[in-house]
Image (tube, coloured by chain):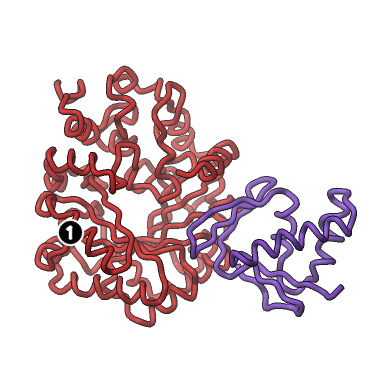
Amino acid sequence: MSELYVARHPAAAWRRLEDEVIVMAAQESWLFTLNEVAAEIWEAADGRTPLASIVRDRICEKFEVDFEQAYRDAEELLRALAERGIVLLSETPLEAGTP
Amino acid sequence: MSGLMERVTQKALALGVPLSVHLDLTWRCHLSCIHCYLTERNGRELTTAQLVRLLEELAECGTLFLLVSGGEVFLRPDFFEIVEAARELAFSVRVKTSGTLLDDEAARRLARLHVAGVDVSLYSHRPEVHDAVTRLEGSFARTVEAVRRLVAYGVKVRVVQVLMRMAEGEYSRVRELAAELGAEYSLDPTVTPRLDGSRSVVRLNASHAAWRKVFEDPELDAKPEHCPLSPEPQEAAQTAPEWDSLPCSAGHTSCYISPSGDVYPCVQFPLALGNVTERPFREIWADSPAARRVRSIRVADLPICRSCEFLNQCSRCPGLAYMEGDLTGPSRLNCEQVFARTGRRPAPLAE
């Protein structure tokens, strides 16, 4: 399995609101929320930390889930977000995803 | 408001989060608009460092939507430094400007900063009428050019028209012009009193007949429940009043901060909550007695409005009521709009 890196798209605006993250996609002016698990991935999406590390360190332990399943779910979510221009995905490290 | 936005707003309300903040960087302006509500032009302004620290505080408090306005924001030499800081802190930033100082480089930079949008004021499709409002010859041409520049760089632009008597029959032409320019259009039907309470500018308001036409226009957002004074996400926080509902979002999930750092519930609600140079914003927001007072008021606490037959058709603005002398009283301007819409006088107008 090749490494996968994820970064928040620089156009996104976002804020954590208790256990979820609110994201505003600037170009489309639409709003969505990420649940507790997705919020953990979002906050860790710095473009430099491999997704596998994010899932292992921030998801599996905290939510007591199996790595393989959690990784598949995370990748599926992130590919959907990438299609909508919310995150950037790459097999090599990305510039820090700001903001 | 979308269902999701309503849910987010309700959550922010429950958590005491100031989800939307309107921040004026300066009250200086090179225009002299005849309807302007500002009364002081050259007061103290927060420094760049103070503003950046304030943005950090707001982000920590959970603010997501930030309206950066003025005065004319481009008179602040550090405007881009502030917007850059706001974007680095992941705010959704809207900018409000006359556009008259916005050059090609500024439009390009705003696009690169991924601002959520730019609101540009336009008062008529006729240059001479617009220029008569701004009292700056050539301002119409410069504003329209700014809209073109921004749109060319992919920035979302909303042309905002304050409806005034001298152009009350022409708003559809301004809307058409906005569409031609590739911009959205929003109409604010109300000229409000100056911040010092002076009502001299209120006479500029459109006639009742024009208001009625506007309120009945299905293509406009100038509906009774729409509050053009609040940042966009707060617009429909005023739902149809229920007995225990909140009069509006001001002071609950939104607030206004003046160039000198004074915090108010709303730009049109000059009840000072505190100053960020004297006390951290978080403390002002959470502990100010004035904020607690505003938050304690429910529709049931409005002695006149609660029994008004037009309660569910009124967009009562607590800030206007406060400026008219009573925080829990009716706002005469809102009563007049109800009269324009229904043809029947609410009780306060009959007195």
In the rendered view, would you say A68 is above or below B345? below
Residue on which the image places disc 1: B173
> In the figure, what tint was chain A given?
purple
Q: Chain of mark 1?
A: B
Q: Is residue B266 visible?
A: yes
Q: Position of residue B117 (x, y in %)?
A: 41, 63
Secondary-structure class at tag 1? helix
Q: Position of residue B170 (x, y in %)?
A: 14, 55
Residue B113: x %, y % from top left: 49, 72
Residue B108 located left or right of residue B58: left
Q: Which image quarter: residue A77?
A: bottom right
Q: Which three-letter amino acid code belongs to the residue tagged 1? A: Arg
**Along the horizontal axis of the image, is B53 left or right of B213?**
right
Residue at (60% x, 52% y) in the render: A22
Q: Quadrant of the N terminus of chain B?
A: top left
Residue occupying image coordinates x 41% and y 70%? B155
Q: Quadrant of the C terminus of chain B?
A: top left
Mark 1 Cα within 10 Å, few/some/many (few <14, many 20+)?
few
According to the colouring, which chain is red? Answer: B
